[in-house]
Image (cartoon, rainbow, N blue to C red):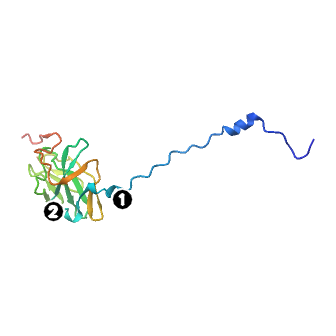
Amino acid sequence: MAAGGFRGHVPTDKKRLVDIIPVESKPNEPTSPVSFDDAVTDETARIAALEDVPDDTTLLFTVSDADGEPKEVVLSRLSDGAVVAFRNYCQHWTDARLDGGEGALVRNGEVVCQKHGATFQLDSGYCDFGPCEGSILESVDVVVDEGAVYLDDAYSFEHLGGSGVASDGDSANRIDFTGS
Ligand code: FES
């Protein structure tokens, strides 16, 4: 017998064992997420210059939803410089606007519904006084970049100012906390 060990061929069935070792599967590589910079470079989402956003009242603008329906939004700046946005209706009577076009009443960091006096904390939208106490305003996402405020929500920006629609509430619900 020749020295040097086994010189025969690898049996076919053993080759197959090697062949069928599964290749480690890897999940799909994630696609590059849309970066913040990409999102805000869309000038169609630009609402206003940061310096035009008041901290003592609200700036009213109009967006449209996926069905093209106009919706009003109010924008305001907090004492720490952060910018917040909420849909322009009270949680008590949803056909009551917070900002009728002249800017909402903002006092001590709260927006006041002038219909029945409910107050909503601007940093959270939380109602801490009034007939809808405990409710929360519907927030709208915005971002600030390079001195401008951009819409960062499912809505599309339309224009500054009101929608021109008589009532902006989603369903004109009137939550009758007061019995009136
Ligand atoms: S409608 Fe706003 S407090 Fe009643």
Taking the image as drawn, is residue 110 in sight? yes
Closest to the observer, 100 or 179: 100
Closest to the observer, 54 or 173: 54
Specify the farthest residue to the right. Answer: 1
Q: How many labels, in total? A: 2
Q: Secondary structure at mark 2?
A: loop
Question: Can you tell which mark lies on residue 123?
Answer: none
Taking the image as drawn, is residue 137 in sight? no
Q: x and y percent of residue 37 in the render?
A: 36, 59
Q: Residues within 10 Å of mark 1 (few under 14, many from 20)?
A: few
| Residue at horizontal 17 percent and vertical 58 percent from the top | 59
Question: Can you tell which mark lies on residue 56?
Answer: 2
| Residue at horizontal 19 percent and vertical 47 percent from the top | 71
Q: In the picture shown, does residue 55 fall above or below 117?
A: below
In three-dimensional space, the C-alpha distance between marks 2 and 1, rounded to whole angstroms, equals 29 Å
Quarter that holds the N terminus: top right
| Residue at horizontal 86 percent and vertical 44 percent from the top | 5
| Residue at horizontal 38 percent and vertical 56 percent from the top | 35
Q: In the picture shown, does residue 144 fall above or below 170?
A: below
| Residue marked by disc 1 | 37
Amino acid found under the numbered disc labelled 1: Asp
